[in-house]
Image (cartoon, rainbow, N blue to C red):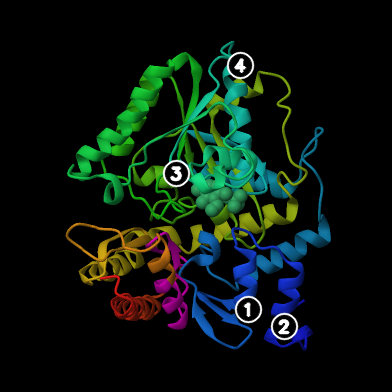
Amino acid sequence: MTLHQTNLTTAELRAIDAAHHLHPFTDTKGLNAEGARVIVKAKGVHLWDSDGNQIIDGMSGLWNVNIGYGREEIVDVVAQQMRELPFYNTFFKTTHLPAIELSRLLAEVTPPQFSRVFFTGSGSESNDTIIRMVRHYWAAQDKPGKSTIIARKNGYHGSTIGGASLGGMTPMHAQGGLPIPGIVHIAQPYWYAEGGDRSPEEFGLWAARELERTIDELGADTIAAFIAEPIQGAGAVVIPPATYWPEIQRICRERDILLVSDEVICGFGRTGEWFGCEYFGVQPDIMAMAKGISSGYLPIGGVMVTEKVAEVIANAGDFNHGYTYSGHPACAAAAIANIKILREEKIVERVKSDIGPYMQKQWLALGDHPMVGEARMVGLIGALELTPNKKTRASWPVETGTVGLIARDFSFQHGLVMRATRDTLIIAPPLVISHEEVDALIAAAKKTLDDSWAEVKRRGYV
Ligand code: PMP
């Protein structure tokens, strides 16, 4: 149903939503007291709500609408695919044209070591697949003891039991008895919050060597893999110091541990490279993908593996794993069209050499605001750390997240979607954003900071 097909008012729509819809990651009572914002259409980098407000989508939906909204080519190929073959599975010795073409395209756009893909429906499903796949990989080589997976505190890998267990989000672990056994979490490379007196370079090495210490303590013969996001997204856009990833690569290679890069946010151009691991110059064995693979036009994900990993799995008989929608034809068709747009319009290159640097310059300048402890950005993914004291990077004298929410609400009022993670503001606009739209986004972000600063002073938080 579109808004054109309903005569309901915003208040009526909100009431129905409140009565029947449980939202993800939401305090339902709090939301229903306020009423959900009803989004009715989108074009390019803009959203419109049911009251007619136009808003810049500074978060690309949920970090996924990389090519922006309203690309008719995708609508057309999906409609065509649904007429021809809306569904068939890829189990039981069958395949279909979209799955064939998408797997070849992925082998082309991913780093050279990758050759094969296992299709999933989402990032969570990709990471659940990885848990089973890496254990199967070692068991197939007569090393079933190599089964523990090392992940990181404050990492995010999804909401399924496996994904949430790999993730290091304590509020998620507190619900539903997580994590599952066999997953160990180590320190994250979050210099602003945890670096203390160390330089970013020293801290990056220290955080990477937590992996080394943990592997050596547990024994490399018990460890299957290390999984991490190149840049932690949901954790608050944690950009590791330059020393971190090369050291992680060395440690995994020396100890024969599979290196898994969760590219669900960083993949498909977000960092100005096709994949985040390329930005940091590392060569993982496995990548989790979703979101930007189809720019969110339809849900699809995948696990990309090197030829070496694929060979072991290929020679180990049945891999007893798969989803009804693994390689769904319409979703695969959307992903193919999306990747072609990214490639033909050189959108990733544009992030690296044009719009990325253009936005970074203005975003990093927001770091001069009295309320900002650190402004950081790579490609088109960034954050602002809000603090009452720039020098000491102090936290606020109220419950964590209070100031973040104040700022996020001002941001909406100024026509910009930013996300607040604790007291950090997050930005990740569509990769097709124009120079003028960046200027408008930065102007709204500045107003947001000014109004938030006035508000925290009024409330006596500084
Ligand atoms: N991994 C990362 C790095 C993510 O950011 C997310 C989603 N935000 C996921 C996995 C889970 O993806 P999905 O929500 O599609 O299951």
Q: Are marks 2 and 1 in contact (CB under 8 Å)?
A: yes
Q: Residue at x 51, y 28 (%)?
A: 149
Q: Compare residues 39 and 361 and report the one nearer the observer.
A: 39
Residue 340: % across, % down: 56, 58
Residue density around tag 2, few if under 14, some if 14–19, many if 20 or more, within 10 Å: few
> Callout 3, which amino acid?
Glu
Q: Residue at x 57, y 55 (%)?
A: 291
Q: Report the residue marked by disc 1.
A: 41
Q: Is residue 2 visible?
A: no
> Callout 4, which amino acid?
Ala
First in sequence: mark 3 vs mark 1: 1
Magenta range is 406-430
Q: Report the residue marked by disc 3.
A: 229
Q: Is residue 304 left or right of residue 368?
A: right
Q: Residue at x 34, y 81 (%)?
A: 451
Q: Secondary structure at mark 2?
A: helix
CA separation, marks 3 and 4?
25 Å
Task: Specify the label residue 139 is tagged with.
Answer: 4
Determine whether the beta carbon of the residue marked 3 sits less than 8 angstroms from the nearest atom of ligand 1: yes
Q: Are marks 3 and 1 in contact (CB under 8 Å)?
A: no
